[in-house]
Each structure stands twice: as C-alpha cells, then as structure tokens.
C-alpha cells in the first residue's frame, strides 16, 4: 500500500499522520500519532483511524533528545509494525517568505532558502525544517514536499501586503505575510461543500483560535486580509505570544530596560499572551475552570481582541455574511463562541444557544444576518493533498 507521511514538527513535539494514497482517490487517514516531551519526557503515541491504540511508549531523554531523534524512532516503529510503502513526505513549514506562494519539492537548495526565515518564526521554522534535513540525509530518494502557512495569503493586494516603510524594505521581504494558511485553505474548501452560497461569493471571516490564533478575511474563498503579519506574533493574543503590540513598547524594553533581543524574543513568544495575562496557564481550558482575576482578564482580553479584529476584517470585506470558528478553542469552547457572538451583535449576529452548546455546524438563528459556523480544520489532510499532487504530475 502506497502511503504519504505528513509531518508537523514543533519545538518539543512531532505530530505525524499516515495517509493511503491509492490512485484516483482522496487521501485516506490510516494512522495519527505524536511524539511529545522530546528531550524531557519523550512519549510516542499513535492510533489507527478508528481510534484503536497502536502504541503508547515512553523513552529516556537521551534516547530522544531532539526532533531528528524523534523522527528516527517514529520511523523505526512504523517500519517494524506497519506494512506501508512510504512514497512521499509532506511537511508543514510555517514561513515561506517572499519566495514561495505554493507548495514546493523540498531539496537542499529549498532547505537553504527556508533556513533564512528561522528568525521570523523561531518557535516553528527550525523544527519544521529539522525532519526535512534529516530525511534529505538518510532518504535522499524520497519525495518531500514543503507546504507553507504563508502561501494562502500571498495574493493580498498591495495595501494589505505593505508596511508603511520605505520601499526598499518591502523588496527585502519585510511585508505582511499572514499565517495559518493551511487551515484557512482547508476551511475555505469545506465551505464550498457545507455552505456553497457563502463560499462562492460571500464575505467570510474565519477565526483560527488555538494556542496560536489568527483571523482571516475571505472573499470568494480567497484571503484578502489577515490579522498576522511579518511574523506569527501579530494580531490576536495567543497561548504564550503577545499578539499586537505597540513597537514603542519594544523600543522601551531595549532603551530603558536594557533588554537584549533574545530576552525580548523570549518574552514575546514564550511568556506573554494568555499565560502572561493570567499568570496561570496558556491553556484556555484551565483558564475557563479558574476563578482567579488573572484568568478572567485573559479570557476577557482574548474575546475583546477577537471582536476588535472582526470589525477590522469586516471593514476590509465591506460587510459580513458569515463568521467561522475553527481550531482547538474555536471548535471546542462554546463559552468563547457565545461571548464572541455577543460582541458581534452590532453586525446582526444572533447565536442559537442550543446549537452552540451542541457544537452544530450552523450555530446562528434563522434571524441572524450573519451565519455562524463551526468548521473543524484539517491541516494534515491539506498537506496530504498537496503532496499527492506532486506524486501525480
């Protein structure tokens, strides 16, 4: 059986999925797994598509010290226990920079170009590239495809793409890229099935609300504006990332607090967002279960910023026909959805409490001027599709 491996590598975890890619069919998910706690408490877990557990194994830190070692261990397990024929690997790569507006075969030259964007996505890019580098070394014959979170947004108009800086900086690549593009691409495609009248010509805001969070304005299924920009720090507050912040604050940190760039980077990426505001956790589930003032502030701030950015994106669209929730918080927190909907009542949004509690596809009432939807995202399937397109050319 020919299969595609999809890899989404983070700083301390590697998520992977195996898809059957039989000729003439949609990729079918066979295995879903994750290597977590890399370097501290490594643990490999995987299950079959029906939910049957295939492995739950812990390792010592020295056995799985980094992403490359995790990939090697996962590969060994797959080869020992599964009868697949691995034909290609698709990778999520957060930043494609100005060079890549679509998926690309990942070779040594492409890898070198993508390494230049590691400072723009320090939480993701180095780890996204580590499995590519390892496979190029150990399996140079294997087709690898890099799929970018920035690619879906590359059709933005100049006014959405530029910063108000001298043109020379834009030519260097200092521009507003936008992220979570694989998620938005998948949701845009799903809308063509579940709400075709909205997808074809509707004005849609998609809110990807998870540990990383952003929002995207879709017109005719195409991205026209995003809350994220040059890096994945902009826009909404996230689990540990600050979201939008006055650049003057960063100048203050440097000049008045004598903070080094590395310290500022750590603050903005690791110690801010919901974690920084609450002083408790970056996990929305823990915050919703807490009665602490910090947790209340963090949730209030999160909802407030979603509403503010929704107004901005609605202005970019010239109105609003639908609002879509997706990703971990968007798909699972009925309380956040209800509060966001209430904040958007000025746009004619009316949520159906029962439908929202039950996490239905459509959670707005018939009287609502704006359709409210929950559309679970599937970035891995999107990567599998892109990878398959290279196999069939």
Image: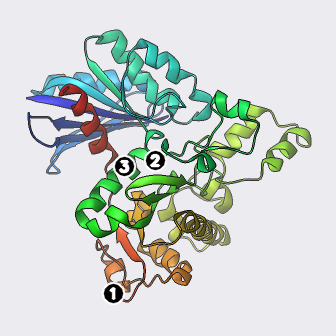
Q: Residue furthest bottom?
A: 367
Q: Is residue 135 left or right of 38 when viewed as pictured?
A: left
Q: What residue do we see at 84% from left, 43% from top? A: 251
**Which is in the foreground here, disc 1 or disc 2?**
1
Q: Picture quarter containing residue 46?
A: top left
Q: Secondary structure at mark 2?
A: loop
Residue 348 locus on image (x, y percent): 49, 84
- Quadrant of the snapshot with the C terminus: top left
Q: What residue do we see at 18% from left, 37% from top? A: 19
Q: Is residue 98 left or right of 367 when viewed as pictured?
A: right
Report the Cα–Cα distance between label 1 and label 3: 27 Å
Camera-nearest residue between 59 and 220: 220
Disc assigned to residue 180? 2
Residue 360 locus on image (x, y percent): 29, 74
Q: Secondary structure at mark 1?
A: loop
Q: Is residue 51 left or right of 369 when viewed as pictured?
A: left
Whichever of callouts 2 and 3 sits on the residue coming sooner in the sequence is 2
Q: Looking at the image, is 336 positioned above or below residue 164?
A: below
Res. 200 visible in picture: yes
Q: Residue furthest right?
A: 256
Binning the other alpha carbons within 10 Å of mark 3 as few (below 14), some (14 to 19) or many (20 upward) gives many
Q: What residue do we see at 92% from left, 43% from top? A: 256
Q: Looking at the image, is 223 positioned above or below residue 30?
A: below
Whichever of callouts 1 and 3 sits on the residue coming sooner in the sequence is 3
Q: Looking at the image, is 60 positioned above or below residue 111?
A: below
Disc 1: which residue: 366
Disc 3: which residue: 185
């Amino acid at each position: 059986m020919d299969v595609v491996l999809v890899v989404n590598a983070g700083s301390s975890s590697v998520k992977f999925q195996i898809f059957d890619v039989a000729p003439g069919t949609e990729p079918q998910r066979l295995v879903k797994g994750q290597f977590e706690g890399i370097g501290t408490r490594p643990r490999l877990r995987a299950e079959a598509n029906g939910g049957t557990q295939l492995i739950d194994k812990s390792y010592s830190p020295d056995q799985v010290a980094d992403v490359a070692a995790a990939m090697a261990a996962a590969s060994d397990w797959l080869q020992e226990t599964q009868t697949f024929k691995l034909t290609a690997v698709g990778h999520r790569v957060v930043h494609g920079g100005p060079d890549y507006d679509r998926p690309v075969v990942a070779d040594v030259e492409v890898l070198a170009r993508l390494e230049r964007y590691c400072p723009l996505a320090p939480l993701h890019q180095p780890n996204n590239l580590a499995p590519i580098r390892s496979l190029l070394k150990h399996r140079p014959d294997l087709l690898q495809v890099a799929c970018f979170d920035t690619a879906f947004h590359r059709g933005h108009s100049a006014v959405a793409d530029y910063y108000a800086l001298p043109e020379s900086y834009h030519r260097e690549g200092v521009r507003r890229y936008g992220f979570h593009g694989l998620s938005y691409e998948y949701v845009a495609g799903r809308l063509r099935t579940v709400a075709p009248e909205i997808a074809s010509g509707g004005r849609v805001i998609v809110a990807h609300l998870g540990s990383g969070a952003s929002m995207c304005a879709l017109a005719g299924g195409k991205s026209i504006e995003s809350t994220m920009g040059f890096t994945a720090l902009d826009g909404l507050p996230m689990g540990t990332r600050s979201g939008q912040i006055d650049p003057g604050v960063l100048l203050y940190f440097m000049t008045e607090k004598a903070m080094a760039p590395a310290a500022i980077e750590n603050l903005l990426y690791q110690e801010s967002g919901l974690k920084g505001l609450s002083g408790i956790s970056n996990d929305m589930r823990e915050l919703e279960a807490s009665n602490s003032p910090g947790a209340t502030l963090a949730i209030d701030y999160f909802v407030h910023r979603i509403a503010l950015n929704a107004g901005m994106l609605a202005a970019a669209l010239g109105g609003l026909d639908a609002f879509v929730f997706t990703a971990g918080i968007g798909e699972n927190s009925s309380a956040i959805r209800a509060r966001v909907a209430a904040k958007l009542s000025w746009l004619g949004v009316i949520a159906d409490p029962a439908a929202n509690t039950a996490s239905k596809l459509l959670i707005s009432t018939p009287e609502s001027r704006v359709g409210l939807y929950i559309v679970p995202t599937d970035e891995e399937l999107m990567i599998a599709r892109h990878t398959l397109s290279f196999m069939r050319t």
